[in-house]
Image: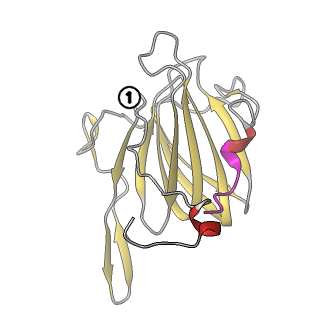
Amino acid sequence: MKIELAPEYNDILSFETYPPAPAIAGVWTHPLRKNRSENGAFMEYLRLGGEGVQGLPGQLVPRQISVSWAAPGRINAFHIHVKEEQNEVWCVIAGQLTVWLVDCRAGSLTLGVRRKLVLSGEQPTLVYIPSGVAHGYQAGEQGATLLYSMDAQFNLEDPNEGRLPWNHFGEELWDADKG
């Protein structure tokens, strides 16, 4: 190293790494653009055509659009859709969510792969979650508002919301990054 440190610092020094996010087959993200002006901002969430959503890396024909509000610090995990196919596109429009995705699909090339995403209303991004990929989130200090679209409609009589325990993939997933 070019800079010499005192031994008590040198012995505990580590370096941050920036490996690419692990890929999960079928999962994709797409950043959205906020068009700002002096009196606010405008953003397109989804542009729809006859074949469903236009201009995205994958296909989705929305059958329902929903909003979920998460209280500050709330962990809502893990959901998984298996009774029927239900693919989702998520977008945080206010606050922040730490999202974990885990591929649980038998025979998938990425079975067991875990991926962490941080979604925020400040820099909105779409994330596509295919059926069989467990998903859960923890809201940030201000809570969060999640706008999401599904290619299936919610059935109150027979919900397609399988649940795995919040800590099934490890409690450490939800630990705060303390730098």
Structure colour scheme: secondary structure
Residues drawn in magenta: 173-179
Q: Nearer the viewer, residue 144 or 108?
A: 108
Q: On the picture, is 90 further left or further right than 78?
A: left
- Which residue: 54% across, 57% down? 14
- Image coords of residue 23 (percent x, y): 40, 33
Quarter containing the N terminus: bottom left
- Mark 1 Cα-neighbour bin, 10 Å: few <14, some 14–19, many ≥20: some
Residue 63 position within the rendered picture, expressed as x and y whole percent measured from the top left: 45, 35
Quarter the C terminus occupies: bottom right
Q: Is residue 148 above or below residue 37?
A: above
Q: Residue at x 46, y 69 (%)?
A: 122
Q: Position of residue 138 (x, y in %)?
A: 67, 51
Q: Is residue 15 found inside the magenta-colored segment of the image?
A: no
User: Residue at image x 75%, y 35%?
Assistant: 167
Disc 1 designates what residue?
Answer: 26
User: In the image, residue 56 lies at what x, y percent?
Assistant: 27, 43
Left of 11 or right of it: where is 20? left
The secondary structure type at the circle numbered 1 is loop
